[in-house]
Amino acid sequence: MLGMSITGRDVLMVGGGAVTARRLSRFIAEGARVRIVAPELHETTALLVRRHEIPWRARPVRARDLRGAWLVHVATGDRRTDRMVTALCERRRILCAGEGARGAVRMTAQVDAGDATVAVASRVGADPRRSAAVRDAVADVVADLIADGRLPLRRRRSGMGRVDLVGGGPGPADLMTVRARRLIAEADVIIADRLGPAAEVLQSVTSDVEVIDVGKQPGHHPVSQEEINRLIVARAAAGLRVVRLKGGDPFVFGRGGEEVQACLAAGIAVEVTPAPSSAIAVPQAAGIPVTHRGTAAAFHVVNGQGELGPTTLAALADPGVTTVVLMGVAALSRLVDAALLHGVPPDRPMAFVESGHTAEQRTTWTTLAAAVADADEVSLRNPAVIVVGDVAIPGLLLPTSTTMSEAASA
Ligand code: SAH
């Protein structure tokens, strides 16, 4: 059996019923140039015909309708007509698919794995239900393999280069999306940060994949953003599939926007895969909900290294708002001073959550007034998320000594 692309090719569909409707959406998705001959149309077929401006002849099929078609799909609901059309195709050497399965072409039940497709067909005449059942079982296995990063999806022949900015989440590989795992399995080049799941995930990458570590540590930037942009663009322009793997979400203080701009400016195809951001996921790992009914109705996320603008000061002062500070360890005393000067009550609850979602996770419960001394005492270290607000009251949801997973297993 063969695989055939019908993109841009003339496909005639004979019959306008439910089977046609199903196949029509698939042919449209494949980019075929479809036309239909049928006395009348099923509701869904009619909808698709209107929406996609499919040419439709409202009458029974005639032999000359077949002219020019690469593929004829026949499903009229009338066996004699189906057979007649199938026989006519056979004589004229036109590929034919459809009801009765006498035609040469069998529809596959298929599951996509990135830009590869796994298709199931029957060797002994069409049996769409069995094909679909086999496909579903295969799809489960494919999904598991992608989720574990074990499906060898990487292209062996080069093609068009592209860039994917992939969010890795706060740390554990199983907090990554299935799409993130698939894109990593497809990548020729992985440009990774130090934060997030990089270390764990990159262990399973084969040695022929180029891995570039551009890990940024606070105060220590081994590779500049300009250099990262240049690397990404150059590799993709050479026809490679580039994954830019980041901690958390690419668009939350990840400079993902600049990388997208660099790709677009160079005419490189680029897409972004979202992920749980540490701004939400790290407090959550310590049992702190960034919003909580009756306690906090909004949250404000800020980069601790930047200026403390009026919006951040207003958020810190508002008892109904949670302020989440990323990259805030070095700037903690500056933040505390500014808040106290602004009139934020000294007993405003605060929490430090270090290395959230990892084995080293540690939470320190404190207040605005005690924060600097407490940070000193515990030797607060990066990466950490600082939470300010009533959601950081110790024991709001859980006993303070436990993490979410400890509470669940207790
Ligand atoms: N794009 C990322 C944030 C990058 S800024 C995201 O959406 O999560 C880097 C900051 O994120 C760190 O300084 C720290 O404040 C926070 N961070 C990331 N992962 C963390 C983790 N596992 N535990 C604690 N903080 C983390």
Image (spheres, helix red, strand yellow):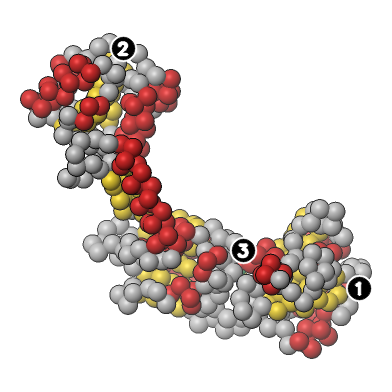
Q: CA distance from mark 3 to mark 1?
A: 28 Å
Badge 3 or badge 2: first in the primary sequence:
2
Q: Position of residue 397 (x, y in %)?
A: 79, 64
Badge 3 or badge 1: first in the primary sequence:
3
The residue labelled by disc 2 is: 39
* Label 2 Cα crowd, 10 Å radius (few <14 / some 14-19 / many 20+): some
The residue labelled by disc 1 is: 346
Q: Are marks 3 and 1 in contact (CB under 8 Å)?
A: no
Which mark, residue 277?
Answer: 3
Would you place residue 109 above or below residue 19 in this image? below
Which amino acid type is marked by label 2? Pro
Q: Residue at x 67, y 70 (%)?
A: 409
Q: Secondary structure at mark 3?
A: loop
Quadrant assignment, res 398: bottom right
Q: Position of residue 320 (x, y in %)?
A: 85, 57
Q: Quick check: 224 left or right of 76?
A: right
Badge 2 or badge 1: first in the primary sequence:
2
Q: Is mark 3 within 8 Å of ligand 1?
A: yes
Nearest to viewer (mark 3 / mark 2) = 2
Say whether residue 237 is visible: no
